[in-house]
Image: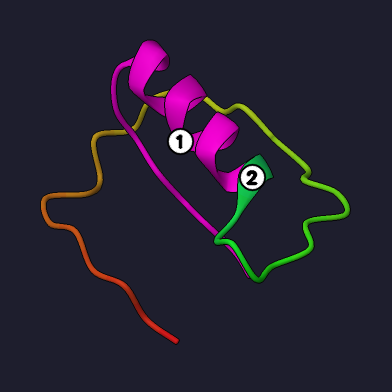
Amino acid sequence: MLIVAEGPKKDLEYLIEVSREGPPSAVVEDIEVRWEDYKGEFQEFKIAF
């Protein structure tokens, strides 16, 4: 799974924390986080599978 997100750092840190836990039936083995400069390129939120 790939997550690309922009926003306030505290909100992104919370997203990372929640992603490390995953849903109840999931086993999250590792998460790679890569910080980049803010680009302001996202105007909407969408989940795609």
Quadrant in the picture for residue 32: top right
Question: Where's residue 13, x and y in %?
Answer: 50, 21
Q: Is residue 38 above or below residue 10?
A: below
Locate residue 5, reporting x and y percent: 40, 44
Gap in angstroms between the C-alphas marked 1 and 2: 10 Å
**Residue 15 has which mark?**
1
**Is 38 one of the magenta-colored residues?**
no
Q: How is the image coloured?
A: rainbow
Q: Work out whether mark 1 precedes mark 2 in sequence or the reverse, and give the earlier one.
A: 1
Residue 24 pos. (x, y %) = 59, 62
Rendering coords of residue 20 (x, y %): 67, 42
**Hey, which residue is sitting farthest bottom in the picture?**
49
Q: Which amino acid lies under the numbered mark 1 shown in the image of this protein? A: Leu
Could you tell me which residue is drawn at 69 percent across and 67 percent down?
26
Q: Is residue 31 above or below residue 2?
A: above
Closest to the observer: 35 or 15?
15
Quadrant of the snapshot with the C terminus: bottom left
Which residue does the image show at 24% across and 35% down from the upper left?
A: 40
Residue assigned mark 2:
21
Q: Is residue 9 left or right of residue 7?
A: right
Residues in magenta? Answer: 1-19
To which quarter of the image does residue 17 belong? top right
Label 1 vs label 2, nearer the camera: 2
- Label 2 Cα neighbours within 10 Å, binned few <14 / some 14-19 / many ≥20: few
Q: Quadrant of residue 15?
A: top left
Q: Is residue 3 left or right of residue 43?
A: right
